[in-house]
Image (cartoon, grey):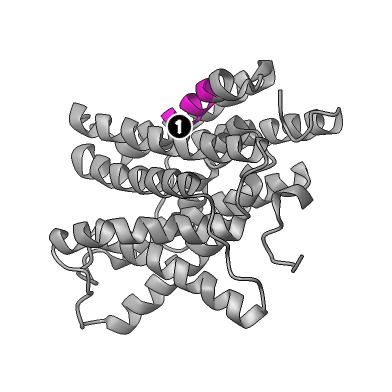
């Protein structure tokens, strides 16, 4: 079998899968900063940006296959392809609607805070994964840390029920995508990570094309076009093609609940970028929330690794 940078699920250890997920979540945090630089200057709305991100990521994966001599991604089973693509699309679109409906801080904390809880409940009910005391403690700690991180500087931001409903829908879409990927891996029918990433974003991009047009236009404005192209290329390459490829690979060998909590690193990496590159200052509550979140993620990662070493078989309870 030809080697690719995204190892097939059966060749991955749990430790490497954890590393993949951490790198993936960190890369996702950079997407927000790139998007912030695009909004207001490129003329692109959130749906158009997501469409370009999806189609661009798929195109870059095909280009990598051609340049590196990797086999072209084989199409997954039709049902698997449809579920993954649809849940990915729902996850992203519902999140953008939540941001518009109730603001960035509330939308993010509800989406990313509810997602691991929904995954934990789904994994317990559908996959029979045992959460355990360490898992419960880590999930509670991570959600608490995220709440402090996001709401500590939110001030008197208004919470609107409609926006919160969209955020919960986004969390549900993410949880369904995570649980489906883990269930497919347990049954031995999961597609390789390269194929999962390529086809999921291809479906997402195609589904979003008409909505991006209705939003106000798919093409960016000509002023500052070079800068827009560079930022779009970065978003398509790093947090999309690479980030989601690593995510799908790591998710195949790491418990669904663990994967969902580790991806909460995303707002931490975004906060670091805001301080280091954008000159923003972190409030004490934000620093405290970041520390609690990282501590919870680290504890859960060590618990997962110990469970694998004791013969947990890749996290199956």
Q: Is residue 212 magenta?
A: no
Left or right of 146? Residue 1 is right
Tell me which corner region of the image, top left, top right, bottom left or bottom right, holds residue 193. Answer: bottom right
Q: Residue furthest right?
A: 310
Residue 88 lies, in percent from the top left, at 41, 47
- Residue depicted at x 20% and y 60%: 210
Q: On the rendered image, what quadrant is the C terminus found in?
A: top right
- Residue depicted at x 62% and y 47%: 21
- Residue depicted at x 50% and y 34%: 289
Residue 254 lies, in percent from the top left, at 67, 38
Neighbourhood count class around disc 1 (C-alpha, 10 Å): few under 14, some 14–19, many 20 upward: many
Vertical arrangement, residue 108 with respect to residue 240, above or below: above
Vertical arrangement, residue 276 with respect to residue 109, above or below: below
Left or right of 60? Residue 301 is right
Residue hosting label 1: 115
Vertical arrangement, residue 110 with respect to residue 191, above or below: above
17 vs 22, nearest the viewer: 17
Tell me which corner region of the image, top left, top right, bottom left or bottom right, holds residue 72. Answer: bottom right
Q: Specify start and end residues of the magenta stretch as a single range.
A: 114-122
Where disc 1 sits, the SS reads helix
Left or right of 2? Residue 213 is left
Residue 229 seen from this side: yes
Q: On the rendered image, what quadrant is the N terminus found in?
A: bottom right
Residue 307 lies, in percent from the top left, at 79, 28
- Residue depicted at x 85% and y 29%: 311
């Amino acid at each position: 079998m030809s080697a690719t940078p995204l190892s097939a699920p059966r060749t991955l250890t749990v430790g490497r899968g954890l590393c993949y997920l951490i790198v993936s979540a960190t890369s996702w945090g950079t997407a927000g900063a790139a998007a912030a630089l695009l909004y207001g200057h490129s003329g692109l709305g959130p749906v158009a940006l997501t469409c370009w991100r999806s189609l661009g990521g798929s195109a870059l994966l095909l280009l990598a296959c051609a340049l590196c001599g990797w086999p072209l991604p084989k199409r997954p089973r039709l049902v698997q392809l449809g579920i993954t693509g649809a849940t990915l699309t729902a996850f992203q679109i519902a999140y953008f609607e939540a941001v518009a409906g109730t603001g960035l801080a509330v939308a993010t904390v509800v989406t990313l805070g509810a997602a691991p809880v929904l995954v934990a409940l789904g994994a317990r009910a559908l996959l029979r994964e045992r959460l355990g005391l360490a898992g419960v403690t880590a999930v509670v700690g991570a959600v608490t840390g995220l709440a402090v991180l996001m709401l500590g500087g939110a001030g008197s931001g208004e919470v609107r029920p409609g926006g919160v409903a969209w955020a919960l829908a986004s969390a549900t879409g993410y949880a369904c995508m995570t649980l489906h990927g883990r269930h497919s891996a347990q049954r031995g029918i999961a597609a390789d990570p390269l194929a999962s990433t390529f086809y999921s974003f291809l479906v997402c991009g195609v589904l979003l094309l008409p909505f991006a047009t209705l939003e106000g236009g798919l093409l960016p404005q000509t002023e500052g076009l070079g800068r827009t192209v560079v930022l779009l290329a970065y978003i398509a390459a790093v947090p999309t093609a690479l980030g989601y490829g690593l995510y799908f690979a790591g998710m195949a060998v790491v418990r669904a609940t663990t994967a969902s909590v580790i991806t909460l690193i995303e707002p931490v990496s975004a906060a670091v970028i805001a301080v280091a590159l954008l000159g923003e200052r972190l409030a004490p509550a934000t620093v405290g929330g970041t520390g609690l979140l990282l501590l919870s993620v680290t504890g859960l990662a060590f618990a997962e690794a110990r469970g694998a070493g004791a013969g947990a078989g890749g996290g199956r309870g």
